[in-house]
Amino acid sequence: MKVKERRHGIVVVNTGEGKGKSSSAFGMVFRAAGWGMKVCVIQFIKGQWQTGEQRAAEKFDNIEWHALGDGFTWDTKNPEQDIKTSREIWEFSKQKILSEEFDFVLLDEINYCCGYNWISGLEIADFIANDKPKWLHLVLTGRNASPEVIEIADTVTEMMPVKHAFSKGIKAEQGVEF
C-alpha cells in the first residue's frame, strides 16, 4: 500500500436515478480494506436495519461502520428531525475525516441530504477542498449530488436506470438489494 505521503486521495461521487450507487461504493470499501487500508463507512439515510454489506464488514477489523440515519426519509413526517439528524451526521463525518485515522471514508447517501437542502453542497465542497487530508480517499453516494460537489470531485459516475425488477413487482431481494 502506498504510504500516505505518496497517495493522491481521490474524491468519488456516485449519483443518479439508477441502482448501484452504494453497491459500487461498498465494492471500493472492501477493495480498500483488502489492501489493509483503514476504512470508515458512515450512512446518512439508512437506519438500523441489517444489510449484507454491514454483516460482511464485521469480518474485517479495519472497517468501522456507522449506520446513523433515521431510515428512508423521502416520505418523512418530521423534516425538522431529518435536518437535525443529517447535520449531526455531517459533523460526525467531519470529525472522522479530520481524525486522520482513516485511509478511506464512505459518506453513503449524503447526496440525498444536499438534494433535500438539509446540508449545503457548497459547505460539503468547501470542506473537501480545504480540510480533507490530501491522501484520504473519499466517496459520496446518493441521488442529487450538488453541482459544487460534482465540480470538486475527481471521479463522478451517474447511474441511469434502464430496467429494474421492482417495475415487475419484484420487491428487494436479500443478497442483491440489501
Image (tube, helix red, strand yellow):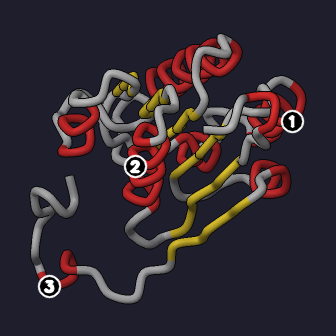
Kind of residue indicated by mark 1: Ala
Mark 1 vs 3, N-terminal side: 1
Residue 104 placed where, x, y %? 57, 34
Please name the amino acid that badge 2 sits on.
Phe
Q: Is residue 159 above or below residue 93?
A: below
Q: Which of marks 3 and 2 precedes in the sequence?
A: 2
Q: Residues within 10 Å of mark 1 (few under 14, many from 20)?
A: some
Horizontal relation, residue 100 to residue 18: left or right: right
Can you identify the residue that label 3 sits on?
168
Q: Nearer the viewer, mark 1 or mark 3?
A: 1
Residue that carries the numbered disc 2 in the rendered image: 26
In this view, the residue in front, 55 or 94, is: 55
* Residue at horizontal 73 percent and vertical 36 percent from the top: 120
Badge 1 or badge 2: first in the primary sequence: 2
Q: Read off the residue under disc 1.
A: 129
Mark 1 and mark 3: span between their CA atoms? 43 Å
Task: Report helix, strand or loop for mark 3.
Answer: helix
Q: Residue at x 80, y 39 (%)?
A: 125
Check disc 1 and report its element: helix, strand or loop. helix
Dividing the picture into quadrants, the one containing residue 101 is: top right
